[in-house]
Image (cartoon, rainbow, N blue to C red):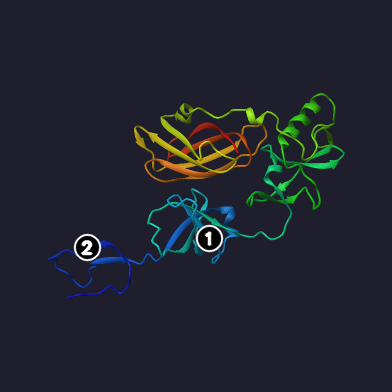
Amino acid sequence: TTISSPIHGVVTKKTALQGMYVTPEMNLYEITDLSTVWINADIYEYEVPMVNVGQDAVVTLTAYPGEAFHGRVIYIYPYLNTETRTVKLRMEFPNPEGKFKAGMYGTVEIKTTAGKQLAIPQEAVLDSGTRTLVFVDKGQGMYEPREVQLGHRADRFYPVGSGLKPGDRVVTSATFLIDSESKLMAAANMMGALGMGGIRMEQAQMGQMEMAGMEGMKMDQPSSQREQTVEGVTVTLAVAPEPPKKGENVIRLTIWSEGKPVTDAKVTVAYTMTMPGMGVDTVEAKPTRDGNYEATVDFAMKGGWAIDATVVRGKAKPVTAHFTVQAGT
């Protein structure tokens, strides 16, 4: 007796064997139509209001570098993962060539709009940990430190909640140099308390500041220092591309403990410029296979970057490995 499948697809499960006894309630074959696939992604709690069903989504896979696939959001899960503070999305993507394979990992980008509002580049922000500052150009070489309230970063910009008004000119390059010089001047009693009035610096004209000597500074670690063992956990760091570049880079971590790969850890990557007062960005590294974890970071400028990889495993004490890399052009 020939029984034809009602759909075109791939046999993903087969329980039928020649000579076996078959009853009506038995599933003999499982056939999956892979012409359209679902992709699940996690977004952070603060990103939930910016995502809606029906929005366009773009996914890139490590298996097909340089190729982007387009789909849309079809479902937003109604609950939050309390451990990772993330919400899961379900997206639908056409798969006519069968390139999507079950279990693949990728990076999903969902473009949203925050409307028209005041925003500043991320390079203009100086985050001390207790307050967030920008330097406002007052004209004639005068710069005023201004405390601001910022929203969540979108692309390379921060929306401004308070502290600035449309038309203000802010320093967008080498703010840490202005901050350092202002503190030196304060120590020498050449200015009042920081934040009261302007800071005069003849050498720090807007848009003309050069980070002299930065090109020759080598803060990258030798390959032998890309592996650290902390509390019995060995963490090995690799960066793609190698050497790292200004812009997006992929951080790959290999984690072993007691001679075995660690596959069940929550891994976060914190990165910041190796300069005082620079802000810290944190991303979650996703597991791939055999104790390997990957995260995408964005090095905003050339220079040395400190990378802290934190590994959390169940009730075990969290461990952090510290690395430094040098981002080029």
The Cα–Cα distance between marks 1 and 2, rounded to whole angstroms, is 37 Å
- x and y percent of residue 170 in the render? 77, 44
- x and y percent of residue 147 in the render? 75, 42
Q: Is residue 259 left or right of residue 42?
A: left
Front residue of 269 and 241: 241
- x and y percent of residue 59 in the render? 49, 56
Quadrant for the C terminus in the image:
top right
Front residue of 113 and 302: 302
Front residue of 63 and 53: 63
Earlier residue among tags 1 and 2 = 2
Q: Residue at x 22, y 63 (%)?
A: 15
Q: Is residue 174 left or right of residue 235?
A: right
Mark 2 crowd level (few <14, some 14–19, many ≥20, 10 Å Cα)? few
The residue where tag 1 is placed is 57
Tell me the SS state at disc 1.
Answer: strand
Q: Residue at x 78, y 31 (%)?
A: 182
Is label 1 in contact with label 2 (beta carbons under 8 Å)? no
- Give the vertical position of 100 relative to 138 (above or below): below
Q: What amino acid is labelled 2 in the image?
A: Thr
- x and y percent of residue 216 in the render? 63, 28
Mark 1 crowd level (few <14, some 14–19, many ≥20, 10 Å Cα)? some
Residue at the limit of the structure toward the left, as seen here: 19
Q: Is residue 270 left or right of residue 21?
A: right
Front residue of 88 and 83: 88
How many numbered badges does the structure rendering display?
2
The residue where tag 2 is placed is 15
Task: Kindly report which numbered mark, 1 or 2, lies closer to the viewer in this rendering.
Answer: 1
